[in-house]
Amino acid sequence: MLHALVWLGLNERAVFRYQGARFRLYDTTLTHLMFFHPTRWHGAIDLALLRQLLRPGDTIVDIGANVGSHAIPLAKLLGASSPVHAFEPHPRVFAQLQANARLNRLPNLHLYNLALGDRAGEVAFTDVRSDDCNRVLPDGAGALTVPMTRLDDFAPLANASITLLKIDVEGYEPFVLRGAEATLTRTDFLYLEANAMHACEYGVSVQDLADSLRARGWTLYRVADSATLTRLPERPTVTEWENWLATRSVDALRERLAGQGVRILPDDE
């Protein structure tokens, strides 16, 4: 059905439901996952866990929001008392995020066409049309350039207390965190991708990412599934990528998840 709609140029007129929200049927990898595998792909696992962790009134920041697979369902679930700030740097994907947001009419959802990193200026970005997981180009020569700033310098979030900072930027996570030192002191939980495949292209590793966060007082857990968190070992093995949940207070994490059926386990290595 999707291929026929794409061939006819009608796919973007089609709307489907995902995690309680409405989305346009874009011909992108992430949208395909949401449409064909709405309960089985890793984003659905993310949301199942985050639904248990978060509460109305929480403040969410989503860096690498893509078409809104996380930001839109969370904004809808948590309601008007929970501001959700979503950053997506690629202009084409940002336009898709905007269109999906309009479908859901969420006054608590705030969108920014901006990259976040460890400096202000512009950054080279990939422009792969068939794959919406575009990312910063480490060699500085890209198909397009996008504006970038540090999260610490982003005025709308100055002094804001953040419940959850979600970062999925295809290996560029350490640079986003370097530009968010002050913001991290006002953040309760991190949900981030540890991407061993791409991190090395930026001269960093998932070990660097883990060490940096631990040095700043964070306790890290692997997200095994929506009901299992496993304490990250001192020297984690990540062959491709995985998601981590980090907390400043293990007690606060346990309190949030109490009675939710989520197991918090010691490390497995």
Image (tube, rainbow, N blue to C red):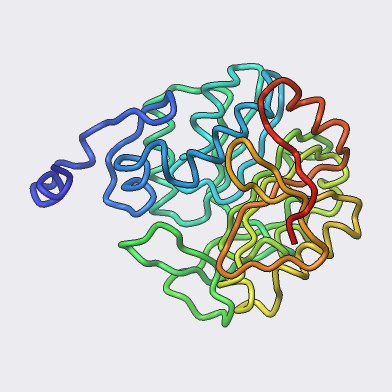
Identified at 17% across, 45% down, the residue is 2
Q: Nearer the viewer, residue 79 or 262?
A: 262
Identified at 56% across, 63% down, the residue is 170
Across and down, in percent, residue 90 comes to 47, 57
Q: Along the horizontal axis of the image, is 96 left or right of 167?
A: left
Q: Is residue 144 visible?
A: yes
Q: Is residue 254 above or below residue 7?
A: above
Q: Quadrant of residue 203?
A: bottom right
Q: Is residue 196 above or below residue 107?
A: below
Q: Quadrant of residue 190?
A: top right
Q: Nearer the viewer, residue 233 or 85?
A: 233
Q: Along the horizontal axis of the image, is 24 left or right of 116?
A: left
Identified at 76% across, 69% down, the residue is 207
Identified at 43% across, 23% down, the residue is 20
Label total for image:
0
Q: Quadrant of residue 160?
A: top right
Q: Is residue 119 visible?
A: no
Across and down, in percent, residue 53 comes to 69, 29
Q: Quadrant of the C terminus?
A: bottom right
Across and down, in percent, residue 45 comes to 53, 40
Q: Nearer the viewer, residue 260 or 146?
A: 260
Q: Along the horizontal axis of the image, is 36 left or right of 266?
A: left
Q: Quadrant of the N terminus?
A: top left
Q: Along the horizontal axis of the image, is 113 left or right of 185?
A: left
